[in-house]
Amino acid sequence: MRIAVFALQGAFVEHEHMLQQLGADTFQVRQAADWNQHKDGIILPGGESTVQSKLLQELGLFEPLRQAISEGLPVFGTCAGLILLSPSHLGTMDIEVRRNAYGRQLGSFHTNASVSHVGTDIPMTFIRAPYIEKVTSPDCEVLSEVDGHIVAARQGNQLVTAFHPELDNDLRIHEFFLSIARK
Ligand code: GLN
């Protein structure tokens, strides 16, 4: 199992540590040349979605990435990565996203909640996070809600969380992603 972790900008090393603890190999995608290696899945980390989207375009990675995901390559997007999969960017996931949804005061917070197919009491760290306002296709399954807002969803091989599971010591979400990538 080999997972490509986008390392253009933002928090990617923590994702690699989680995946490595679960026995997966990882490599970083920093430029177009890195992309052509064999991979069983992709991580789109948190950071700044506008900057990431622009970098993907400049590096010529936007279209190859979009195509690979459309063809079913498993992808896990956290926070900015979730925004990248929404219609304003790659558009592979049928979700309506609200960016920086928690405002300035509540920009960052921590809670625990259940995630369907994953478990209960999952630690959730939110950092200037988006949430999903709604899913716009029956193919997209809501996996978790916090305070009435969707914070995790899955559509086929695409998994997204508004929070950062890589920043807590709980491997269950990454394990769930690897189970999707193993199929
Ligand atoms: N606020 C960022 C954005 O809109 C996302 C923050 C994050 O990834 N932690 O892209």
Image: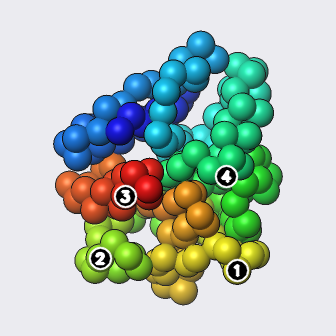
Q: Nearer the viewer, residue 49 or 109?
A: 49
Could you say whether the residue bearing mark 1 is in a helix, strand or loop? Answer: loop
- Which mark, residue 179? 3
Nearer-N-terminus badge (2/3) = 2
Q: Which residue is mark 4?
A: 85
Give the number of the mark in front: 4 or 1: 1
**Residue that appears at 54% across and 69% down:** 153
Name the residue that disc number 1 marks: 138
Residue 176 vertical placement versus 6 (above, below): below
Q: Residue at x 73, y 40 (%)?
A: 67
Amino acid type, residue under disc 2 in the picture: Gly
Amino acid of disc 4: Leu
In percent of width and height, residue 54 lies at 74, 30
Which class describes the residues within 10 Å of circle 3: few (<14), some (14-19), or many (20+)? Answer: few
Q: Is residue 39 above or below residue 101?
A: above
- Snapshot quadrant of residue 28: top left
Task: Kindly state the secondary structure of the residue where label 3 is placed.
Answer: helix
Q: Nearer the viewer, mark 4 or mark 3?
A: 3
Farthest residue toward the top?
A: 33
- Crowd around label 4: few <14 · some 14–19 · many ≥20 (10 Å): many
The residue tagged with tag 4: helix, strand or loop? helix
Q: What percent of the width, then of the height, locates residue 76?
A: 50, 51
Q: Amino acid at mark 3?
A: Ser
In the image, residue 34 above or below residue 74:
above
Q: CA distance from mark 2 to mark 4?
A: 24 Å
Residue at which label 2 appears: 119
Residue 13 seen in render: no
User: Which color mode does the image show?
Assistant: rainbow
- Density class for disc 1 (Cα within 10 Å; few <14, some 14-19, many ≥20) is few
